[in-house]
Image (spheres, coloured by chain):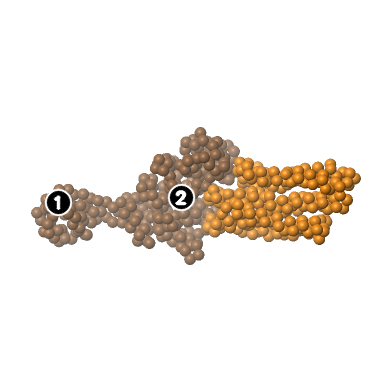
Amino acid sequence: MSDWMPWKVAKKDFKVMKRKKSLIAYTVMLPFLLAFVFALVVQNDVVNASISDASLGLAALTFVFVILAAVLPTAVAAYSIVGEKMEKSLEPLLATPTSDGELLLGKTIAAFVPAILSIWGGALIFMATTDYLTFNVFSGYYFPSWVPGIMLFLLSPLAAMLGVQVAVILSSRVSDVRGANQFAGLMYLPFLALFILGVQGTFAFSIANLLVVSGIVMFLDITLFVVSKAIFKREDILTKWK
Amino acid sequence: MIAAENLTKTFGTLTAVDKVTFKVDHGEVFGFLGPNGAGKTTTIRMLCCLISKTSGNARVGDYEVGDTEDAPKIRRIVGLVPDNVGLYESLTAYENLDYYGTLYRLTDSQRKENNERYLKLLGLWEKRDVLVGTFSKGMKQKLAITRALIHDPQVLFMDEPTANLDPEASKAVREFILDLKKENRTIFLNTHNLDEAQRVCDRIGIINTKLRAVGTPEELERMVRGRRTVIQLKQVNDTIVDSLNRLGVKNLVRDGNSLIVDVEDPDEENPEMVGTVTAAGGRVVTVTVLSSTLEDAYLKLVREGA
């Protein structure tokens, strides 16, 4: 792993991130903050609800982590590429023997890994707290179970990858980090729509439905990866990117 | 070491580099002199395999520019100092270099050795753990040069390395280029600084989309216009002017008590002119040979091409 070039590219971005306090606060703190807020929600509302309402409520709360997964990596992805543009470091970087694919993959890893790890970290705290608080409601532990499992370990990584790919594509069109992040951040909208439909009862957070959504997101991921790979070419970066 | 033949790059309808042909020998400092937009950076980018060529051929070392398989090999043997330093300001000087060392696939021990060697060489070793964002422009430029050298490239491409630097920092960079020259490195230097080109380059190519001329600074000066002889007399009169015109001198100009004449070979022509002037009754005070400068050559060649 340590000799794998994309990982070396990502490691440099991790180093830069470590010194950008706002980026750490945004990427790492948000899921943990969410876990804390959700624990309060569970304590105040879910523990007093019926089993069916409690199940829906917990599934909806878990789905919020999916929404977050779509948004969280966009900041790092945007910074990782637009930041290089702003520092004018792309030209010397592209003059090295590193391939376009290795650089793109490195940037993707740099955005994806911290975001998904912090989401899983936050979700773990949320699940542990929830199990502790709702043991009597469900006469057992609600987590782990298939629905939140699919949300966190299948749909969340796919949603995070979607956010990364959109940020990469947008990075070629904008010249400031905030612009790229704002546009890419809109990736939460389709997932928010699903969340609202789920809470309303129009969309069921069932295994089948979540697998279908995951399939669609995976298709979009693959399509956008092909697009971003086509965009992330040395000559285009130096001559066509804004 | 570098050879280009009819190398051309177009962007849509715009021709940035037009059928450029030149060679750079091993250990030579070759200057590319031209105004902004002349195609200097585009040429470097083509030779570093950062952008594709539209037509023509070029080789760097043993590798063919434009060949997909050769491109990473060329990037491995060249170092690039771009016009913008492009350093990571939130990393330290050492971290910047170390990252590039990994991108060039140097081993841990090679990186450690080269980081130390080049940081010491450019006087940045004491600042190795300082964030680059706090560096002065001159220090950043030195670090950018160090970064380009980290993998010991055979060819170093420098794109206006002293632009935006104060005179002291510019001098330090120029001196370092001369030190590299002593190490027998091949250096391709883009510049629009005539003084810099004259001081450090073995040969210069003057480019303005097309390559207008290539030669040593002295050859270029001679190429544009021979030389001028200024004969200062005690008193100039029409008889003296007529006698020189009868001799067939070129472009005779009368300026007060001085006569200015274009000459091809001063050693041959000056005694003849002085003899003619004296025979016509003139009393010669001084005879001075004026050479055209690199600046004259540059301006003439660039304007011709505009």
Pick whichever, A133 or B235, lies toward us.
A133
Query: Residue A9: where, in percent of width, then height?
Result: 61, 46
Which amino acid does the dot numbered 1 rest on?
Leu
Give the quarter of the figure containing the N terminus of chain A. top right
The residue most toward the right is A139
The answer to whether residue A114 is visible is no
What separation in Å lies between label 2 and label 1 (alpha carbons)? 49 Å
What secondary structure is marked by label 1?
strand
Residue that carries the numbered disc 1 in the rendered image: B233
Query: Residue A120: where, in percent of width, then height?
Result: 75, 46
The answer to whether residue A230 is visible is yes
Residue that carries the numbered disc 2 in the rendered image: B159
Q: Residue at x 60, y 54 (%)?
A: A179
Give the quarter of the figure containing the C terminus of chain A. bottom right
Q: Residue at x 65, y 43 (%)?
A: A24
Which amino acid does the dot numbered 2 rest on?
Asp
Query: Residue B124: where, in percent of width, then height?
Result: 49, 36
Query: Residue B182: where, in percent of width, then height?
Result: 41, 41
Q: Which residue is drawn at 44% across and 57% down?
A: B37
- Chain B, colour shown: brown
Compared across the picture, whether A104 is left or right of A126 comes to: left
Q: Which chain is orange?
A: A
Q: Residue at x 59, y 40 (%)?
A: B107
Chain where mark 2 sits: B
